[in-house]
Image: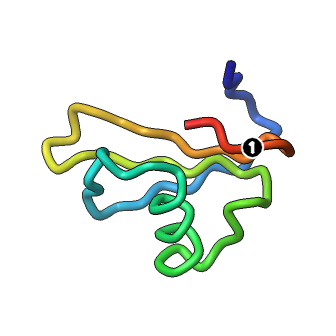
């Protein structure tokens, strides 16, 4: 289970994202568009077009939590 607290850095993608994407595609967005390392342990936040759904991506050392 993902716990959110102040010890993480949070990055928000301002453009909308197709939330059907899995962790491979989302980590590609992190690397190519946000210019960050998806394996850094930071939390990356994605919203759909209507901004009524959210998906978070977080590397936990042994895999991604979405």
Q: Residue at x 52, y 81 (%)?
A: 32
Q: Secondary structure at mark 1?
A: loop
Question: Quick check: 61 left or right of 19?
Answer: right
Q: What is the image's colouring?
A: rainbow
Q: Residue furthest top?
A: 1
Residue 25: name its quadrant.
Answer: bottom left
Residue 6, position in %: x, y?
Answer: 76, 34
Residue at the image position 68 percent from the left and 18 percent from the top: 1
Q: Residue at x 73, y 28 (%)?
A: 5
**What count of labels does the image hold?**
1
| Residue 49 point in image, percent of width and height | 16, 50
List x then y, in percent, for residue 66.
55, 37
Write down the residue under mark 1. Answer: 63
Above or below: residue 35 compared with residue 9: below
Q: Position of residue 37 (x, y in %)?
A: 71, 69
Q: Is residue 48 left or right of residue 32?
A: left
**Corner quadrant of residue 50:** top left
7 sits left or right of 17 in the view: right
Residue at coordinates 76% horizontally, 60% vertically from top-left?
39
Q: Residues within 10 Å of mark 1 (few under 14, many from 20)?
A: few
Relative to the observer, which residue lies in front, 5 or 45? Answer: 45
């Amino acid at each position: 289970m993902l716990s959110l607290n102040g010890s993480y850095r949070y990055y928000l993608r301002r453009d909308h994202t197709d939330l059907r994407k899995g962790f491979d595609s989302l980590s590609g967005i992190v690397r190519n568009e946000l210019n960050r390392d998806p394996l850094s342990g930071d939390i990356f936040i994605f919203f759909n077009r209507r901004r009524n759904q959210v998906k978070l991506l977080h590397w936990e050392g042994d895999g991604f939590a979405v």
